[in-house]
Image (cartoon, helix red, strand yellow):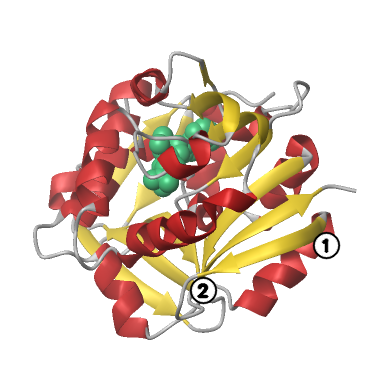
């Protein structure tokens, strides 16, 4: 099992940090603000699909993986005997259910036969290797994923005029400073959000405006003006690409989409 320092070192070595560094108390509250922004279509699309197709999700125990705090799952919760929340942020997990677990979903093993729900397009922010691990470890998993669409629509979701998206990313570096004693200066960094048409990823980066040296566990990281650290990697595949990927690691048994076919919820069982 990797500890968080190892995740951070791996991340800094590759210029890309795992999204879970965003989510302390402050980050979780910022996320709550984000989902209420009119341009953050992801929440609205998922809400639409859940309300339309809730009857097709039922069973004994469900686990809301990376639950955050949300009312969105209510129509589905009614169809299960038990609702468990799971989050890396203890307050979020606890606020969502009196049955809760705190941990890293990349290290979760579904020994209790939950139907695992992985919502909020969180899948877009983890690597393909991690998607494989998750599907195999969860056995029964329901994944919400965003599809590639008009570039402006995708970018606007992460660049709200009140700066909530930017504050979330910068809070990631503030957390890292607090947890690991590093000395990033997020306030001096520039937030950038760009669509990469080769990888089908919306990248959210923080750009250094000062030459900066970071020391972490006897390792030295030297950043020059203009260098970037990426925190968000928001993969926006087309529906058939998601199907292809999920079917590599399991079997997709059903797909539910919104009226515009722009966002999907996939039911997957591992082989
Ligand atoms: C994009 S939000 C989704 C929240 C909610 N499921 C929704 O649909 O609105 C991602 C959530 O996953 C949690 N999270 C991120 N990385 C995690 C990890 N590695 N293990 C457990 N929880 C994680 C965050 O704390 C946050 O609450």
What residue sits 23% from the left and 55% below the top? 165
Question: Quick check: can you spot residue 8?
Answer: no
What residue sits 19% from the left and 46% below the top? 33
**Most distant residue in the right direction:** 271
For this rendering, which residue is in front, 33 or 262?
A: 262
Which structural element holds mark 2? loop
Task: Characterize the local packing of mark 1: few (<14), some (14-19) or many (20 or more) Cα atoms within 10 angstroms.
Answer: few
With 199 as the anchor, is 40 left or right in this view? left
Question: Quick check: can you spot residue 195?
Answer: yes
Residue 187 sits above or below residue 41 on the image: above
For this rendering, which residue is in front, 151 or 75?
A: 75
What residue sits 42% from the left and 23% below the top? 93
Quarter assignment of residue 108 = top right
Q: In which quarter of the image is ligand 1?
A: top left
Marks 2,1: beta carbons within 8 A:
no
On the image, numbered disc 1 is attached to which residue? 248
- Where is residue 75 drawn, in percent x and y? 45, 43
- Where is residue 58 drawn, in percent x and y? 64, 40
With 85 as the anchor, is 206 left or right in this view? left
With 144 as the anchor, is 93 left or right in this view? left
Give the alpha-carbon distance from disc 2 to disc 1, as whole Å.
Answer: 18 Å
- Residue 147 - label: 2
- Where is residue 241 drawn, in percent x and y? 68, 75
- Name the N-terminal-most of marks 2 and 1: 2
- Mark 1 and ligand 1: say if the CB distance to the nearest ligand atom is below 8 Å: no
- Where is residue 27 drawn, in percent x and y? 27, 37
């Amino acid at each position: 099992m990797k500890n968080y320092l190892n995740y951070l070192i791996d991340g800094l070595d590759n210029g890309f940090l795992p999204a879970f560094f965003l989510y302390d108390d402050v980050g979780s509250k910022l996320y709550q603000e984000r989902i209420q922004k009119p341009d953050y279509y992801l929440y609205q699309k998922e809400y639409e699909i859940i309300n339309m197709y809730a009857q097709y999700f039922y069973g004994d125990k469900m686990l809301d993986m990376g639950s955050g705090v949300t009312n969105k799952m209510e129509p589905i919760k009614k169809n299960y005997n038990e609702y468990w929340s799971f989050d890396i942020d203890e307050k979020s997990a606890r606020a969502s259910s009196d049955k809760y677990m705190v941990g890293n979903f990349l290290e979760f093993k579904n020994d209790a036969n939950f139907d695992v729900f992985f919502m909020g397009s969180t899948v877009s922010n983890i690597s393909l290797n991690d998607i494989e691990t998750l599907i195999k470890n969860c056995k029964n998993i329901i994944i919400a994923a965003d599809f590639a669409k008009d570039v402006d629509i995708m970018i606007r979701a992460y660049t709200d005029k009140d700066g909530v998206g930017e504050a979330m990313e910068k809070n990631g570096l503030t957390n890292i400073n607090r947890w690991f004693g590093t000395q990033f200066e997020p306030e001096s960094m520039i937030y950038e959000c760009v669509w990469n048409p080769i990888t089908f990823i919306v990248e959210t980066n923080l750009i250094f405006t000062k030459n900066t040296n970071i020391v972490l566990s006897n390792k030295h990281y030297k950043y020059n003006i203009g260098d970037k650290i990426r925190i968000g990697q928001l993969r926006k595949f087309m529906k058939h690409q998601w199907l292809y990927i999920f079917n590599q690691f399991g079997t997709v048994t059903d797909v539910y989409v919104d009226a515009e076919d722009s966002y999907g919820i996939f039911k997957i069982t591992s082989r």
